Amino acid sequence: MYPVFMAQWMKDKRKPFTILLFIGLSIIATLIFGGSAQQTQTTIPIFGTGPNAEEIEEKWVDLLNTNEQLRFVITEEDKAREDVIEGRREMAIQLMDSDYRLIVATELPNNQFAEQLVHQAYTKEAQLVAVAGPENADKVRTEIENYLETPPITVETQSLAGGEIPSYNMGMQLLFGFTLFIAMFTIGFKVNGITADKVSGIWNRLILSPVSKTQMYVGHLVYSFAVGFFQVVAVLLIFDYLMGYELGSLPMIIVLAAVYTLSTVSLATLITGIVKTPEQFQMVYPSLAPLIPIISGVYMMPGTISSPILNFIGDLFPLGHAVQAMMDVALYNASWSDLAFPITIMLLIGVMCMGIGINMVERRNG
Amino acid sequence: MNSFFKKDLLVFWRDRKEILLAVFLPIILIVILNTAFSGMFSSDAESIHINLGLVLEDDDTAGLEQFAKKVESLEIAPDEKQRIMEQAMQIGVNQQLTGFFKNPELAEWVTVQEVTKEEARKLVEMEELDAYIKIPNGFTNTVLSAAMLGNESKMGVTIHAKEQSTELSAIEDVIHQFMNTINMQLALGQMGELNQSTQPVLPQGGKELVDDVDSYTFPQYFTIGISTLCALFIAQTIAVKTITEKRERVFNRIILSNSPPFHYLMGKVLSTFCLAWIQMMLTYGMIQLVLDVFPDKSATFWIGLFLMITLFSLAVAGLSGLFTSIALSIKDTNSAAGIFTMVVMMFGALGGSFFPLQGLPEVIQRIGEWTPNGVTQTALIQFIQYEKLQDLVIPLSLLLGFFVLCLIIALFTFPRRGRI
């Protein structure tokens, strides 16, 4: 096993450019996508119309910016409209003195939330003006704000046990999702070394050498594992230490990452068993890989995909289990015994894929 | 050149796995996304239904009596006490709350049942209820004291649920909003000395679809995204076949046969164009038939779509030509294939084919708009809304430019005689 492992290592060491590019780009892509997913703020352009447009904009920008998730920014009308038309922004808002219009190009779920918020702000202001009259609206507004700092009615959400319910952090899910998803490519790229060795005849020479079959496979797969694991851990460490995201217990996350990497190596081996040449692998694997996060529901809130068939197919891949388990660690402080189940499932997927994969590789060989 | 073109098509045709993948992958992906998202994008009333328990521990008559006693014990003028009590009688916190839940608009998607606390816990535990709301004993008294006398409110309404869910956040939103309204009213009520006769001019709100155009739907967005992405995969597929041909000495034999090597390149480009075009046509055709993603579109729309597909396939063909040249020039074929994967993936991600780019930094959005799939995506989204053919001129020429640029680079980097 050791010589095979070293052979792979020496190959990369001699020509480090590709693998470094691969890992480097993967890390950058993960940081960009995962990082910007963390920042869940949506920007909504607002603009006023009419002669006293600026005054209106100034007044409302403060009154609207009360929610952390939405950021209202004063924008030129033309640019705001263009951004909506070309799909760069989900919506824009035209402000009037006591009324507003949403400018939208399509119905997206986020729109409703923003609409509610704007409507509330305007209703509040209308009531206020009605009571106080436009002259001393400012004075009454401050008074009311003071009053509402200790509102008579408070609402609180509790879990059944009485504690707080941690809110679901979608950005965190995307962060883990991207980290693991992008690692699939690096892993696949390395596992493909088996088919590459085969077509170049190295595989046959190895068979003739004293190295056993098991050792040949283990050497290759352990190397792929090491590279993939290195990438995932590097990304996670950057997120945790440099960018300061709260990933929860790091040892648990890293163990999960290791188990995930292992079962993804197996998955790639399975694909290796289906294809004949490394080029075929290069086309099948990258086309199938983007399917996995979609079916596993990594891009969406849990529970969004309700079709049992899709859920079942999604459960066949390790990605969904790993992301779910990592979320449990990051959000709900899962214990080791909570993780036992996803880890077992991932290992099971790993063993199955590896078994079938190697069998198919061998059969083709014979 | 014809023979090369035929060869590439045949090589593709013989590999049935690839055919299946190329034809069905985009269709399957789109259908899956459509199923997965259909629940999310139909209006909320249809997709979400919430079962809510209401635990009413508070007795408002008793609460009011308690409050009356409290007011009585205060050292203020009797007519002031009288006024406070009159106001307090009007507030009727519990009625407002229960009335709110019986509101027919809310009843469409929220079913409320009154239960005891123990029942509610059990039902939530069994997931028969999504959440329950508890109005604690003494609530009326507390609220009135807080609202009228300025005491600090120590108990409030609590929402209890097992875990975070879409239903829970929806109900939280609704309740918070309602409570804010009541709080606001109470606050305004306290600004007693002001003139309260004018009715508030409530905002109309309303939505304006940009310039009264057709809006685009999310399924349309990802249909375009997935189909362009899969066409990019074709460029990669055809190009990596070069690597096989290089290894199996096909290319050397072609050179020996004394046919100009450029013909080989053109064969690749042409066959990629044909395959990408057929694939996209099939995808849009099937998706339209099965899911009716573009309902009620005019002939102009279909002509525009046809033009975009054709030119985009051309751009893909150019990309595959470039890839072919690179594959022939680079010695380490494995890394060549890896680089192709990366380029395609980067195009896909930056061009918004995987997911909408709205959340990403503006710089990335700008870069993404220059990738061929990004150009196609933006142009088609705009075209769906306006259906103006002249809007397509710039994106079409951009795609053509991309094709020409790729082809020129491919021709220049294509290995000369004797370098293979």
Image (cartoon, coloured by chain):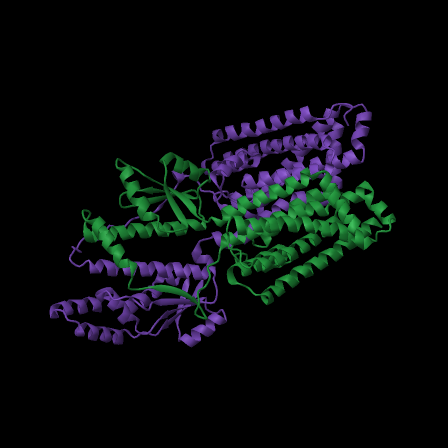
Left or right: where does residue A241 sit relative to residue A124? Answer: right
- Chain depicted in green: A
Residue B199 or residue B66, whichever sits in front: B66
A41 over A315 or under it: above or below = above
Residue B4 or residue A60, whichever sits in front: A60
Quadrant in which the C terminus of chain B is drawn: top right
The colour assigned to chain B within the rendered structure: purple
Residue at (18, 67) in percent of width and height: B84
Residue at (76, 37) in percent of width and height: B244
Left or right: where does residue B378 sit relative to residue B66? Answer: right
Q: In the rendered picture of this protein, how many numbered marks are placed on residues?
A: 0
Residue at (55, 45) in percent of width and height: A31
Residue B358 or residue B397, whichever sits in front: B358
Residue B83 or residue A39, whichever sits in front: A39
Q: Is residue B318 visible?
A: yes
A65 over B400 or under it: above or below = below
A13 over B53 or under it: above or below = above
Q: Can you give x and y, in whole percent of width and height, for residue A257 in the image?
A: 62, 55
Left or right: where does residue A238 sit relative to residue B159? Answer: right
Left or right: where does residue A124 sit relative to residue B374? Answer: left
Q: Can you give x and y, in whole percent of width and height, for residue B280 in the image?
A: 61, 39
Q: Can you give x and y, in whole percent of width and height, for residue A217 in the image?
A: 77, 52
Would you identify the image quadrant in which residue A329 lies? bottom right
Q: Is residue B28 visible?
A: no
